[in-house]
Amino acid sequence: MADEKELRYDPSAIEPKWQAKWAANPAMYAAEPETTEKPKYYVLEMLPYPSGKLHMGHVRNYSIGDALARYMWMQGYNVLHPMGWDAFGLPAENAALKNNTPPREWTLSNIAAMKVQFQRLGMGFDWANEVTTCLPDYYRWNQWFFLRMYERGLAYRKQSKVNWCSLCATVLANEQVIDGRCWRHEDNIVEQRNLEQWFYRITRYAQELLDGLDKLDGWPDKVRTMQRNWIGRSEGTEVDFAVEDLDGAKIRVFTTRVDTIFGATSVQLAPEHPLVAKLTADNKDIELQISAMIDEQKVARETDNLGAIDKQGIALGRYAINPYSGERVPIWVANYVLMEYGTGAIMSVPGHDERDFEFATKYGIEIRRVIRQVGDSEEDTPMPFVSEEGILINSGEFDGLICGEAQRKLQQVAAEGGFGEAKVTFRLRDWGVSRQRYWGTPIPMVNCPTHGLVPVPDDQLPVLLPEKIEITQQGGSPLAQVPEFLNTTCPKCDGPSTRETDTMDTFVDSSWYFYRYIDAKNDKAPFDSAKARYWFPIDQYIGGVEHAILHLIYSRFWTKVMRDLGMIENDEPATRQFSQGMVIKDGAKMSKSRGNVVSPDDMIARYGADATRMYSLFAAPPDRDLDWQEDGVAGTSRFLSRVFRLVHRYAPIAAGAKGQTYSAPTGTSLALLRKLHQTIAKITLDFSGRWHFNTSIAAVMELVNELIAAEGAFASGEVPAAVVAELLRSLVLMLAPFAPFLAAEFWSELGEEGEVLRTPWPVSDAALAKEDEIEVPVQINGKLRAVIRVIAEADRAAIEAAALADEKIIEWLAGKTPVKIIIVQGKLVNLVVK
RNA sequence: GCGGAAGUGGCGAAAUUGGCAGACGCACCAGACUUAGGAUCUGGCGGGGUAACCCAUAGGGGUUCAAGUCCCCUCUUCCGCACCA
C-alpha cells in the first residue's frame, strides 16, 4: 500500500483548517444551560496573567485541563471549561514606563495575542463568559465586595508594619514575600515600613479554613499541609504576670506549656512591646540598647537572617510576679521575641525549652527542673527536657500531675483567678490588600474632612480607574497625582473630599473570578446565585503548586465570605484540586536569565500543536516536574505520523464499512480487538482518577504498534472491514483528548460527520478484553526459573500440575519435592524447596 | 531545626493490591530501502559472563515463599515553613 507517493503528516496543513472551523463555531465548547439533563462538570485551570505570550508551564497546565474537559464531554457531561485573564498587575505599569504604552492598551493587546495562541493550541475554552479582571464590569464587583466586607468589619484600616518592595514601589502581602524577598523580584530584599493600610480579616476564618482542609480529600496532601502550616494553629494559655512597682500593669504572656510555669525564671518582652517604654522610663542607657536591638533586628529581617542572629537580651532591672507561685521573676527584653506573634511577651522556662535554655545559659539565668521524665528521677531527666511526656515536680500543689492534666488544671485556676485563660493562637495574619500602584482596582472609599472615611455608595460603582495617567515611579500612589480622580465629594455631606488612592492587591481579582465565569455579563450582581448552586463547587481545579498558599487560601476565604453573605451554598470553591509539576529544562526551571526558555510558538511551528500538547502529557505524570527534551517532542511527532499513515491508508475501508457488524472474531481480528479493549479500559481508568496520562499515551502507542504490525491483514481482508472500522474509530476517539486536531481530521476521514466531542467515549468490552491463555512465571525459592502458558480459567491444581510438569522446572528441582507451593491465581507460582 | 516529596538503564520514565524490574518513548548500535528526508522499515540496547547463569531499583540491616513496593537506620536532592513561645 505504501509504494505510491504517500501523503505525509503535516500539522500545518491540518491544524489551521480546524482552528478556523472551531473559531467559527463557539457553541462547540459552550456549556449548556442549567436546565439540561446532563450531569455538570466544572473543570477550571488557573487563568493566566496576560504577559503577551504563553510559556510551557501554561501549555502543560491547559493541556491537562483540556484533555480532562474533552474526556468529560465525551462521557456525556455538561462541561464548563472557561478562560479569562488575570489582567491587573505591575508588569503593565512597567511596560508603560518602558515603552510609553498605556497599561490598558498593553494588556488588551497581549490578551488578543494570547488568545490566538490558545486557538493555535486548540484549547477548548468556552469564551462566552470570558473574564478580564482589569475591565470595569469585573472590578466594580471587587469594589462591591470590598463594601460588603467593610460593612461586616472584614475590611479595615490600620497602621502596620508592612513589607515594602522598592522595585515594585509598593506593599506586599505576607504571602508574597518569599525568603525575605519579593515574589516578583527574587533579588530584592523586602523592607519593613509603617503605613496605614487596608486589610481583609482572613483571621476571622482561620479556624474554619483549617478545619475545612480535613474534608478536602480531593486536594493534594502537599497543598493541605502547606496551608495547615501557614495557618499555624497553636493551643496554649495566656497568663498575666503583674509588674512590680507599676500600678496595675500586667504582662500577658502566651505559652503552649503552662504546665512548666513554675520553672519560669524570667519574663521576656519583644523590643517593640508597648510596656517597654514605661519600664525603661528615665533609663536612657537601656532605651538606647533596645533601639539598637530593634535596628539590628530590622536589618536581619530584611536580609532574611532572623534565625541567624544571636539571641540577645537586656535585663530591665524590673520584676514581674508569677501568679501561681507569687515568685518574683526578672523582666527582660529579648530580640527573639516577636511582637507579631502571641502577645509579644513570653515566660522563659530554660529547663524545658531549647531556646530558653540557650538564652539562660548565655546570661546566667536560673535553670530549674519542673517536669520529670516518666520512669526517670529528677536528676536523670535530661536538660532541657522539652517533651510533654512527664510529671510535674517543684510545682507546689500541682506536683505529680502529668503534663496534659496539669495544663487543664492550671488553665482552670487562671480562669477562676481572673489572671489568664486557654487561648488558641494562629500564625495566619490578616491579608493586607492596599497597593500603592496604579494598575489595580481602586478602593471605593472617600476621605471627608468632616465624616472621615466614607464608603462609596453601591449606586456610584464602579469607581473608575482613570485611563489618562502618567506613570512615575516616585513611590506613593500614582492615583494621588491625578486631581480628577483624587478630588471628589463626600457621599454624606457633598463637601469636598479626597478618594482613597491605593488600589487592591491583584490576588483579590483572582479570589473569585471563577464565580464570575458562570455569569460574566451580569450587571446587577457579581453572579446569579441560582447558577452558582448548579455549577459549584468546581469539580476539578488545576494549576501550579506555586499558588498552594497564596491564591488557594484567599479563594477559600472568599468563598466562605460569600457564603456568609448568602450568595452561595458551598463552603469550599473546589472539591478537587490538582497541582501540576513545573516544566524544567536542563535541570532548572525555564527562565530568561538562564536562557533555557522553550517557546510554545516554536514548538507548534516545528511539530504542531498536537505533538506539543501530547508530549507535555507523555513526558512525565502531570504532578511531577517535566524535563523538556525536544527530541521527545520529535518522537511524539513521529508517533503521530505513524498514526496518520495508518488511518489514512485504511480510512476508506473503515468508512465503507459504516453500519456493518461483525460476528465472533478470531485470529488477528480477535487479537487486535482484545488489545483495543484492554487499551480502552486502561485509559478510562487513568482518566477516572490517577491521571497518569503518560501511561495512557504509552498504551495508545502500544495499540498503534500492534495495529501497524498487523496492517497486512487489513489490506488482505483477513480482518473484516467492520473490525477495521471499530479499531480505527476507537483509536481516534482515544486520541481526541490528547491530539484534538488530528482526531478531528481522522474523524472526518472516517466519514463521520458529528463532532468528536459529542461522540461517546468508547466502552471496554470486558469479555473481549480478556485473554484466553496467560503466561504464568514459575519461581523456585523466589527466583524465576520458567514461564508456563495456561488457559486463563485454569484452577490451582491445573496450574500446579503444569508448573511441575515443565521441563526446566523438573531439571531445577533435581528430584526434590517442594515443601510449599504458592500459587497466586493469574500471577505466578513459587515453589519452595529446602 | 520542623514538615513534605523524591532517589529505578546513557536520558524521560513504567511496574494501579507485596508477585516476571525497566512497558512506552528518546538517544545510541547494526542492517535494509531510497524520490537523501527533520525520512521510513527490520533487529539490538541495565551490568558481568563464550555459556549455563550471576548481579542490579541511593547505601546498610530486617520482615516474607516472594520487596522498587512494608519496617528500622544512613546518605543525597528538591519543595514548603522557620527565633511561632
Image (cartoon, coloured by chain):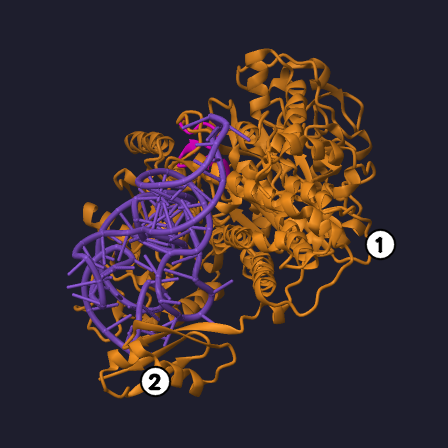
Residue identifier under label 2: A821
| Above or below, A377 relative to A285 | below
Is A54 included in the stretch rendered in magenta? no
Place of residue A174 in the rendered image (x, y in percent of width and height, measured from the top left): 49, 38
Q: Which chain is purple?
A: B
In the picture, the quarter occupied by the N terminus of chain A is: top right
Residue that badge 1 annotates: A35
Q: How many marks?
A: 2
Q: Is residue A746 visible?
A: yes
Relative to A302, is A212 on the left or the right? Answer: right
Query: In the image, A518: left or right of A210?
Result: right
The residue that appears at 69% across and 56% down in the rendered structure is A721
Identify which amino acid the numbered label 2 is placed on.
Answer: Ile
Q: Position of residue A698 (x, y in %)?
A: 50, 52
Residues shaded magenta:
A175-187
Q: Tell which subunit mark 1 falls on.
A: A
The residue lying toward the viewer, choosing from A213 and A616, is: A616
Judge by depth and name the residue closer to the eye, A743 or A602: A743
- Closer to us: mark 2 or mark 1? 2
User: Judging from the image, what secondary structure is the residue with disc 2 in?
Assistant: strand
First in sequence, mark 2 or 1: give its number. Answer: 1
Q: CA distance from mark 2 to mark 1?
A: 61 Å
